[in-house]
Image: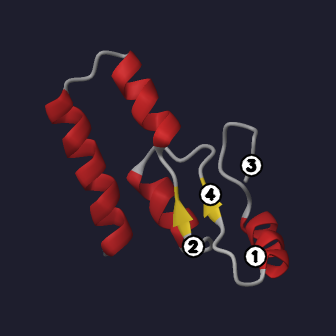
Amino acid sequence: TGGSGRPASETYVAGVKARAKKNPVLVGFGIATPDEARHMAQHADGVVIGSAVITRLAGNQSMDMLCAWIGEIKRALTQ
């Protein structure tokens, strides 16, 4: 959802979920921080952080730092 580089609004996600019926709705645009992931996970069935991972890799972030950041996202989603 989205497409603007920032997370979709809660209203937009709710509309998609209403039309998707039994299909899961994932939000992936603009999810780059643990807070963004936590917030959107409250409205969607899941979040996708692929672009944020690629951005970090392209910025030469170490694998240790990348794994630590992924751990922060995971903790945000499981709290």
Q: CA distance from mark 1 to mark 3?
A: 14 Å
Secondary element under disc 1, as helix, strand or loop, is helix
The spot of residue 66 in percent (x, y) is 25, 35
Give amino acid for label 1.
Lys
**Is 45 drawn above or below residue 56 in the view shown?**
below
Residue under label 4, please give it. 27
Q: Is residue 20 left or right of residue 67?
A: right
Instruction: Kindly identify the residue that appears in the image at 27 percent across and 44 percent down.
Output: 69
Secondary element under disc 2, as helix, strand or loop, is loop
Secondary element under disc 3, as helix, strand or loop, is loop
Specify the label residue 45 is tagged with: 2
Given the current orientation, which residue lies at the most extreme left position?
64
Secondary element under disc 4, as helix, strand or loop, is strand
Q: How many marks?
A: 4
**Is 70 drawn above or below residue 10 in the view shown?**
above
Residue under label 3, please give it. 2
Q: Are marks 3 and 4 in contact (CB under 8 Å)?
A: yes
Specify the label residue 17 is tagged with: 1
Q: Are marks 2 and 1 in contact (CB under 8 Å)?
A: yes
Specify the label residue 72 is tagged with: none
Mark 4 and mark 1 lie on one chain; the one further toward the N terminus is 1
Instruction: Kindly identify the residue that appears in the image at 57 percent across and 64 percent down.
Output: 40
